[in-house]
Image: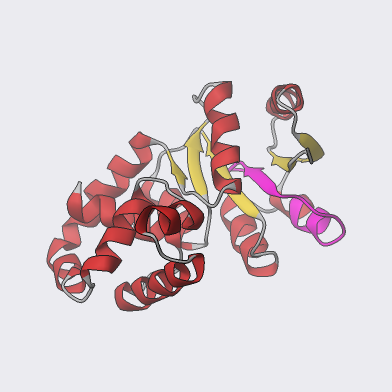
Amino acid sequence: MKKPKVLIVDDNPAVLDGLKIILELENFEVVSLCTNAKEAVEFLEKKHADVVLMDIRMPVMDGIEGTFNIKTKFPNVKVIILTTFCEEDYIEKSLSFGADGYILKSSDAKHIVNSILSVLDGKVVMDKEIALYISDVLKRTSKQLLEKTQNLTERELEIAKLISQGYSNKEIARMLFISEGTVRNYITSILQKLNLKNRTQIAVYYLTKFS
């Protein structure tokens, strides 16, 4: 079985070394350790990684700018924000730039490993604290959200719900007895109707409106 390739980005050497040990014990291939996001972008310009574990606050280029650059240049590379910071600006920007997950460094090793496997399976990963925080922020615009929701079909709402529950396109297709292509078409429609950018934002939207 091919080992997933993981790139770790953090300006703390102890964090880099600790995560490397954990992931290699769990049969991941750690392809590089970077101390800022600029180094990560430069690495990806030459070599491949399946997932990037990205810290937020770093010198030279931080994790927010790094996420934007990586998802713009290498959209198939998954990015998980792994940070100690649960701040509105960081959360909103990283998710709007296409981060596939946002988890806290207080997470145990098993949660980090499962988060990587989940995003590789096409799922959205978000700690409960993060989802609740975003929900509280976005509920300020509840009237606007309600108006947008009314534009979604019953099937689109159903798919949005499944995305918010962490299911991949393949799993959604199997559960609803439709093709993966049809699921992708529904997701495209949802994104257009709600003026969202990615499936992570769909998950946040649904949690905000219906949780």
Queried whether the magenta region covers residue 129, the answer comes back as: no
Residue 176 rendering spot, x and y as whole percentages: 35, 58
Q: Is residue 55 magenta?
A: yes
The residue depicted at 50 percent of the width and 46 percent of the height is 101
Residue 148 lies in what quarter of the image? bottom left
> What is the magenta range?
40-58
Q: Is residue 62 above or below residue 4?
A: below
Q: Is residue 59 visible?
A: no
Q: Is residue 187 above or below residue 171?
A: below
- Compared across the picture, whether 173 is left or right of 110 comes to left
Decide which of 95, 122 is in the foreground and name it: 122
Residue at 76% across, 50% down: 49
Q: Position of residue 16 (x, y in %)?
A: 73, 30
Point 38% across, 72% down: residue:
186
Residue 143 image offset from top left, x and y in percent: 12, 66
Left or right: residue 11 versus residue 129 is right
Q: Is residue 114 left or right of residue 70?
A: left
* Residue sitting nearer the eye, 84 or 143: 143
- Farthest residue in the right direction? 46
